[in-house]
């Protein structure tokens, strides 16, 4: 039988005859969690509250007709992808055809053969699980592409700015060329990382002890051009020997780099970004605080939602993809950590505005 890792699959039985439900209980209770409804109206309410993995729908129910109910199930966001098996009479092929036309995936005739019923239920639950897995994989692949596009864009912008500075200030060309080289190397490492994550053979990040201050200093160095351009002061306050369990490339670029980029982008020229870290038992708590313009509730509430772009211009007109924060959280969660954000807008709190990110990573 098909089983979830933690919970049994939920099957909604919709039948107006208690004796039919009783028979179904006998064969399905052992392997599945059953919820029941005797009318169409009740079935819709039960489905919304239980989110069934499969629906067994009698072709004859009281009140709302089974065909109308099937159509409504197809329109409801919670059930529109839930497989429906019609329970129908063998003497009424029109019911079978109509049910399949309305979106049912299969049918079982009543009185039913127990082994046939169990086989059909198991098959369609398996198909649903595979479909859900494919959907999840497609979302993960989309996120990985966003990782690559977002972080490569940041690195290429740094390389471009340093290239322009090198032409304007020939005496410091070696410094700018070094910055370009570092950005290029980090970009190549990021491509390798995303390719590894994209492959089926390497679905998890390989975590190791990473020196937090050294990683932060590298992230600051990579962002030297925008920091210098806006005359931002970056203040670091943490022990030199503090280490966290993470993956170095994503930590530097997707986590610390995005936090710094966000602070720089929404700070006014001459602003300050403060970064501190403290070890508390098995965790390292990192705080990144800026004195920028802050986030309105509609931005803050969707900041970590991968389906929402929260892109907006920075104080100097800087552009972004709007996915940096979502991708950052993805990596933090992959490390086994957590993140939360607090923010006050300049309009609501003129004397004390800005954003503060609090990240918790495993200490090592």
Image (cartoon, rainbow, N blue to C red):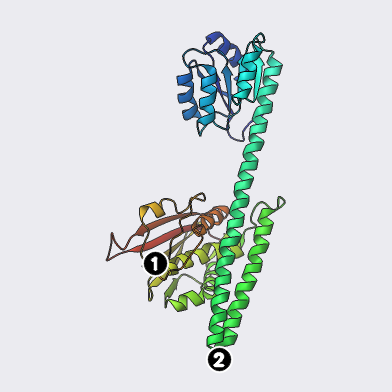
Can you say which quadrant of the picture contains the C terminus?
A: bottom right
Does 317 appear above or below 204? below
- Who's the residue at 62% across and 42% down the image? 135
Residues at marks 1 and 2, CA–CA distance in whole angstroms = 33 Å
Classify the position of the N terminus by image quarter: top right
- Residue 27 lies in quadrant: top right
Task: Report which quarter residue 327 is drawn in.
Answer: bottom right
Q: Which residue is mark 1?
A: 290
Q: Residue 158's quadrant in the figure?
A: bottom right
Which numbered mark, 1 or 2, is in the foreground of this view? 2
Residue underneath mark 2: 171
Residue 159 pos. (x, y %): 58, 75
* Label 1 neighbour load within 10 Å: few <14, some 14-19, many 20+: many
User: What residue is drawn where x is 58% and y is 58%?
Assistant: 147
Q: Which mark is residue 232?
A: none
Asked if the residue under mark 2 is in contact with the one under mark 1, i.e. CB atoms within 8 Å, the reply is no
Picture coordinates of residue 216, whole percent (x, y): 52, 70
Task: Give the residue at x 58% y 86%.
Answer: 173
Horizontal relation, residue 279 to residue 342: left or right: right
| Structural crowding at the residue carrying mark 2, measured as other residues with C-alpha within 10 Å and reported as few (<14), some (14–19) or many (≥20) | few
């Amino acid at each position: 039988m098909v089983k979830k890792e933690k919970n049994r699959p939920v099957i909604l039985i919709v039948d107006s005859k208690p004796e039919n439900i009783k028979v179904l209980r006998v064969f399905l209770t052992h392997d599945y969690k059953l919820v029941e409804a005797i009318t169409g109206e009740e079935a819709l309410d039960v489905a919304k509250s239980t989110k069934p993995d499969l629906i067994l729908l009698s072709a004859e129910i009281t009140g709302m007709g089974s065909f109308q109910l099937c159509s409504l199930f197809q329109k409801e966001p919670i059930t529109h992808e839930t497989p429906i098996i019609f329970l129908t009479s063998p003497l009424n092929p029109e019911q079978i055809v109509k049910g399949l036309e309305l979106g049912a995936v299969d049918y079982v005739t009543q009185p039913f053969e127990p082994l046939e019923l169990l086989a059909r239920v198991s098959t369609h639950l398996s198909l649903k699980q595979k479909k859900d897995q494919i959907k999840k994989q497609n979302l993960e692949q989309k996120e990985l592409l966003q990782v690559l596009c977002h972080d490569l864009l940041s690195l290429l912008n740094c390389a471009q700015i340093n290239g322009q500075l090198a032409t304007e200030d020939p005496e410091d060309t070696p410094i700018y060329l070094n910055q370009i080289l570092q950005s290029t190397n980090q970009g190549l490492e990021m491509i390798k990382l995303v390719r590894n994550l994209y492959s089926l053979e390497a679905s998890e990040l390989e975590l190791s002890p990473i020196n937090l201050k050294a990683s932060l200093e590298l992230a600051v160095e990579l962002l030297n051009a925008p920091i210098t351009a806006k005359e931002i002061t970056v203040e670091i306050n943490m022990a030199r020997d503090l280490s966290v369990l993470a993956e170095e490339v994503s930590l530097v670029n997707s986590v610390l780099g995005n936090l710094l980029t966000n602070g720089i982008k929404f700070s006014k020229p001459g602003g300050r970004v403060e970064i501190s870290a403290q070890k508390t038992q098995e965790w390292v708590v990192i705080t990144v605080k800026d004195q920028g313009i802050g986030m309105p509730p509609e931005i803050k509430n969707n900041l970590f939602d991968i389906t929402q772009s929260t892109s907006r211009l920075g104080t100097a007109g800087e552009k972004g993809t709007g996915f940096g924060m979502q991708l950052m959280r993805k990596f933090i969660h992959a490390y086994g950590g957590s993140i939360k954000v607090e923010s006050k807008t300049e309009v609501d709190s003129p004397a004390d505005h800005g954003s503060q990110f609090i990240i918790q990573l495993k200490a090592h």
